[in-house]
Image (cartoon, rainbow, N blue to C red):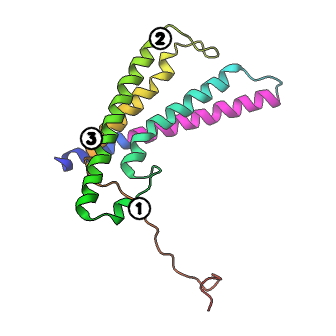
Amino acid sequence: MRGLLRRPAAWVRQCSLWAASGMLAVNLVAILYGVFTRYVAGGAPIWTDELGRYLIIGTVMLATGAVWIEGSHMRVALIERLLPHRLARLLSWYQWLLTLFLALAGAWLGYRYALSVAMFTSQGLGISRTIPVMSLPVGFALLALLAACHGPRPLPTPHEEPHASSPSDPESAP
């Protein structure tokens, strides 16, 4: 079953990373435009700050699931390595269930919140506040989907690869 879910999970992960990268690029252009208009043209439009805020939140929320499934998010994995195998397995189940529960709760609560702010419009862009706030339930739903596909297996941990000492390296000198 897990093997069956790996390909769709990899596809969702890749698509979310591409979308987050695109949003980050648009965010960079909007911020640079705002800086240019503020310091060169004499006044920045208000929408550049607002768009930058919304895009950075959306970028983070879209990338959250992909970062989690890669094990690249900030966490302390020392306990997992020090515990006996059975307890480490139990800890992996606990982490997986907690992530799944929190992601589903975040998706539900984020969705309800996004719908509750539908009557308000943003000051700079003039759009419904629901549009940017929908990045919360979408991001949490992607995290829940990727966590469910990953299953209760231990998350990968980044390992430092030993580097070959070179003659110019002062630490390798006798």
Decide: few, some or many residues near mark 2? Use Cα within 10 Å; few <14, some 14-19, many ≥20.
some
Q: Is residue 117 left or right of residue 155?
A: right
Q: Which residue is mark 3?
A: 148
CA distance separating discs 1 and 3: 24 Å
Q: Point out which mark residue 78 bears.
A: 1
Q: Is residue 90 left or right of residue 174?
A: left
Is residue 169 found inside the magenta-colored segment of the image?
no
Which quadrant: the C terminus?
bottom right
Q: Earlier in the sequence, mark 2 or mark 3?
A: 2
User: Residue drawn 41% across and 24% down?
Assistant: 110
Residue 35 position within the rendered picture, expressed as x and y whole percent measured from the top left: 75, 32
Q: Point out which mark residue 118 bears.
A: 2
* Magenta stretch, residue numbers: 14-40
Considering every residue shown, the one lying at the far left of the view is: 1
Residue contact between numbered discs 1 and 3, judged by CB atoms under 8 Å: no
User: What is the quadrant of residue 148 in the picture?
Assistant: top left
SS category of the residue bearing label 3: helix
Residue 113 position within the rendered picture, expressed as x and y whole percent measured from the top left: 44, 18
CA distance separating discs 2 and 3: 30 Å
> Image height check: is 135 above or below 7?
above
**Nearer to us in this view, 87 or 141:** 87
Residue 8 position within the rendered picture, expressed as x and y whole percent measured from the top left: 27, 42
User: Residue drawn 48% across and 19% down?
Assistant: 131
**Nearer to us in this view, 74 or 8:** 74
Decide: few, some or many residues near mark 1? Use Cα within 10 Å; few <14, some 14-19, many ≥20.
few
Q: For the residue marked with disc 2, what is the amino acid? A: Ala
* Front position among marks 1 and 3: 1
Instruction: Report if residue 145 is visible in the image.
Output: yes
